[in-house]
Amino acid sequence: MQTNFTPEQLQDPELKVANGILRTCVHCGFCTATCPTFVELGDELDSPRGRIYLIKDMLESGRPASELEARHIDRCLSCLSCMTTCPSGVNYMHLVDHARRHVEETYTRPLPERALRSVLAMLLPHPGRFRWAMRLAKLGKPLRGLIPGQGTTAKRLRAMLELAPEHIPAPQPVTGTHPAEGARRGRVAMLAGCAQQVLDPEINAATIRLLTRMGYEVVVPPAAGCCGALTHHMGRHDPAMATARANILAWDAEIAAGGLDGIIVNASGCGTTVKDYGFMFRNEPEAEAAARVSALAMDITEALARFDYTPSRTAPPFTVAYHSACSLQHGQKITALPKQLLAKAGFVVKEPAEGHLCCGSAGTYNMMQPEISAKLKARKLANIRRTGAAVVAAGNIGCLTQIGAGGPPTVHTVQLLDWMAGGPKPKAIEGL
Amino acid sequence: MIAPETEQGVAEAIRAAHDARQPLAIEGAGSKRGMLRPVRAAETLTTRALTGITLYKPAELVISARAGTPIAEIEAALAEKGQQIISEPPSPLGVGGATLGGIAATNLSGPRRIAWGSMRDHMLGIRAVKGDGEVFRSGGRVLKNVTGLDLCKLLSGSHGTLGVLTEITFKVLPAAEATGTLAVSVPDVAAGVRALSAGLGSPFGVSGAALLPGGLASLGLAGPVALLRIEDFAESVTYRKGRLREVLAPYGDVSLVEGAAARSLWRGVRDVTFLDAAPDEAVWRLSVAPSAAAAVCAALPGAKLMLDWGGGLIWVAGEASEAMHAAVVAATGPGSFTLFRAPDALRGAVAVMPAEPAPLAAISARVKALLDPAGILNPGRMGR
Amino acid sequence: MIRLPAPKPEVMARRPQILAGLAALVPADALITEELRLRPYETDGLAAYRQMPLAVVLPRTTEEVAAVLRFCHQQGVRVIPRGAGTSLSGGALPLADAVVVGLMRMNHILDINFEDRYAVVEAGVTNIGITQAVAGDGFFYAPDPSSQLACMIGGNVMMNSGGAHCLKYGVTANNLLGVKFVTIEGEIFEVGGTHLDGAGYDWLGLITGSEGQLGMVTEVTVRILRGPEGARAMLAAFSSIPIAGQAVDAIIGSGIIPVALEFMDRPCIHACEAFAHAGYPLDAEAMLIIEVEGSVAEQDALLARIRDICAQFSPISMKVAESAEQSLAIWKGRKGAFGAVGRISPDYLCMDGTIPTGELPFVLGRITQMSEQYGLGVANVFHAGDGNLHPLIMFDANDPASFAKAEAFGADILKLCVEVGGCLTGEHGVGVEKRDLMTVQFTADELDLQRAIKSAFDPAWLLNPAKVFPLEGNKVLDAA
């Protein structure tokens, strides 16, 4: 597609990358049909092609973002379904990340929205603060109906309270080194994450159990924390880079110290970001370390396939609906592996129709865009119910929370795999 | 009767008639002279002398011929190369001798239409003369063409009222290596249509699906008989006959019809001779959704019936009266009807086909005026 | 660059009143008027041409469409119908004084009838959406343009879209039973129904492929077909384009009509393989994708016949898909071919001429020569069975000289197609792109006749003007 950047603009390395991405787009429109927001809203502006066009115009003109651009870019789930569809190989992820940063830096959002976004950015990446907030939210949940008004802020607050879990599990600290059982076959680092370990600490526990049982030493360096995705997707460049940098340094130190066979990520949203560290830090002093880290990053299912996961129990005749998290299928292009592992573990695996469409969770999306999110959730649940499956497996905590509220019980894929390899039956499906 | 031997001759004749405001009956061989309304014209222009195949490229699946070329002549030329006219042009009620132009202008198709499309579907290009004597072309000689408005479609089925076709180019296909026919004895029309729907809804490529409510004496089948045909490579036909038989078994006794018997059977369906219409009876041709067929037939007790196209094409023969016509029209419901053959008194008095919705009729009148400004082409034929 | 008719000054001057009038007809979220939000509607799948519209309306019902058209008719405002905006001929390119009426919100499937084998859908349902809705019962909607994932049935009707499988199943026109039609005056009526071949003039046939010149279609009744038991694709790779062309002739000549017969040349093979990872032969100068249908045994028998034929032309390799996934990957590459060329060139113009298949080797040879003359790369992918070519001319839109050369190159290819007995467009439509080449294929009188038929539907030429017909010699637009 034609672009109109000045030679001066193209001196800017960020704009140069954006221009390269825009030039790849041939405006064929294939992406529109697989974009969840276009399917729901039916306006080209809420499609990847429309957003690309909007972003192109915004960046070319160099003008500050307006409410309009913020609105349509904010509506993007960053599910990256468009990247799976795109025949031309347009890197929409990097383009929309760039645009989000531009919006964040040049547009002043209304005060309530700014406050909300700041609160989320302050809470979510920090497990301690987040757990504390969840306790408060749990108390406030019964009162959500009392929040007055049909304004955006009221809707968002209600959505946030709606998401608060009834039960907040006790923390299970995982930092430190978890030695391999039996002969050590290798050594991996695990991203402990942020919100996930508050909402469901069993996922990390199952991951560590399974890997150590398979002969892998698992290290969780204390200095590593949130991957930075949450703030990155809010366009908050500096805090995102700061948390990412901490991870890069911590893991790179482990690489130097004892060598790593992989950096395991069991929240695919985080995995997509960790795999992108190399790009994010390409112009930073940590560029090389970031590239090393990205090269080692792998989703837990990739690791299990590579380490030759083998079940030891006979699976009950469960039908498992496998929900393919967007970050896994579109962001990391991992589609068949989790289903193959579940089948290897002995489950009957079904895939819901419209598997390419996002469930509406998408990081903080379900709080910031509650209406679109609710539509997508309803659509997803209807498709899941049609499979008749007793349980839903997915590889991302956001989806598990979103689908779990109102749908069949949800478990992380690794929990089912751990169970079949000798671990405990996941609590969520105790009754089955 | 004017019978030009060249397109230029057709153009000159029409121009002269246009200038003189002299209406012309337009025909090829005249085999469909009795269709629709009587034409109000003292003079007839026939294309029967405008004959000859002008282009035939078997490897490109394309043939062109002048409008007056008899269908039989084209079929013979194609058969030499193992090919055929896809839509299986009929000689309805056994009246043969049709020309290519006549079949195109009436868009009549045989049993294969249900699977492979109508005559109109395969028309790639035309040359024609407008009502003012001007020659025009539409389409071309290639298999895929969306360049400009598709006047081939507009002229197909226009019964010579929008222009006189002088040359037609259309797509042909290889004739099937083998065919097979299954006959299913069914209790009634409704069950028969369900059997046809099951066959057409199967993956076995049914290329003919007819229903003879009166049975098939030649096969000793007294009750209604559903007929299904497969055409393909020999090994496919063998396989598919067997599979289709399984699909059809729940609907009634299934028997196989082979060879010359099968060929004559489908000729009878194609040419509507199974309808067995008496010379003094009127004949209607209805097009409906197949699932409506049973109700249509039930609403016409005493009428002779023959169904094709999976039950969607219903031929009706009955008393040539306005009452019967009204009953047929009422039975057709949202479908389409044609008074195909009737004494002039009846076909001159009733609506021989459904009226267009008012806004479309206004457009239609403008298009007619455009293509036939003096109103000399087959006036009255389509009710205008 | 293509010339567009001058905006009507009286319309531009009354923009506020016109927008207010539209606002009274549709809900607030169905009317787009701000410049920023109009921007993505300034172009379609042919991004080289752009023009901002006056406004965009996104109606949800036929009645809303009718109300908008009626209003525009009263006000003398031009209307540009739009589906998914995937036209490769600029069919949805706006005009400065025109209202774009987009049908993407009319995306509901209204009725599916397996016994009578039809589906009634709103115009904004995607092509593949119809197949997806009936696939569970073993049925499909046959025409399958490469953009079928995104393109909408309303647009398919307006462009008479084809696809890879139309060699056997026909194009859109052959698979329609009826449409709900809205005239520029805002009149709504049905054309056709749920039956075949009704009596009377074939308005459905005329409307199909009319590129928005006659009216808008809001609902479509399509035939659905029971799918075959199975289908399998094979790849045959050849050392030269003419040899592959001869193989195509031999296959058709043998009496086999494969359900699809597709051709790719070397640049295209490489681009598509990078996208689809389908195992395309990277060492070939030309490749055929040949698909057959039926039971496994039938597929085997047909593929054996085809292999024997191909073997006579010293293929570099032949490969039969071994699984449904492999067949899917083979088709993914083919259907993403245009976009995939975006990987090797920033921009392309996609031509769409059809030629008699006997002329394939000659025409492809000439295209190669022209490519050298113009100094622009070309990738060829097309429907070999029906001679519908898709040369993709690669250029750089940021270089105006390159674009001008690409346009001239494209025009030369299309003129060549007409010269050898073919046509300008086989399935993409004339649009704005090939408008001025219409005089190559039609005489002035023939064009006038087609224009007059448009006038019979749209006397003031408000519907998608500036498309299909050359502006030169257009009496109505000139007078305006």
Image: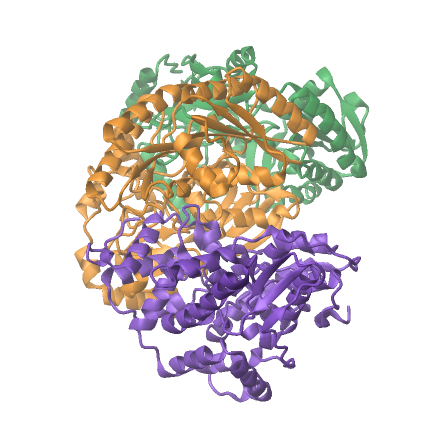
Chain colours: A purple, B green, C orange
Q: Residue at x 33, y 64 (%)?
A: C32
Pinpoint residue A66: horizontal percent, then vertical percent. 30, 71
Pinpoint residue C286: horizontal percent, then vertical percent. 44, 26
Give the number of marks.
0
Q: Nearer the viewer, residue A282 or A260?
A: A260
Quadrant in the picture for residue B343: top right
Instruction: Give the vertical position of A194 relative to C293 (above or below).
Output: below
Q: Nearer the viewer, residue A417 or C441?
A: A417
Quadrant in the picture for residue A398: bottom right
Pinpoint residue A424: horizontal percent, then vertical percent. 75, 68
Instruction: Give the vertical position of B361 relative to A241 (above or below).
Output: above
Q: Nearer the viewer, residue B262 or A309?
A: A309
Quadrant in the picture for residue C104: bottom left
| Residue B187 visible somewhere in the drawing | no
Q: Nearer the viewer, residue C91 or A258?
A: A258
Q: Residue at x 45, y 26 (%)?
A: C284
- For the C terminus of chain A, give its image quadrant: bottom right
B261 left or right of B120 in image: right
C253 left or right of B303 in image: left
Pinpoint residue A273: horizontal percent, then vertical percent. 47, 63
| Residue A32 visible somewhere in the drawing | yes
Q: Residue furthest front?
A: A257
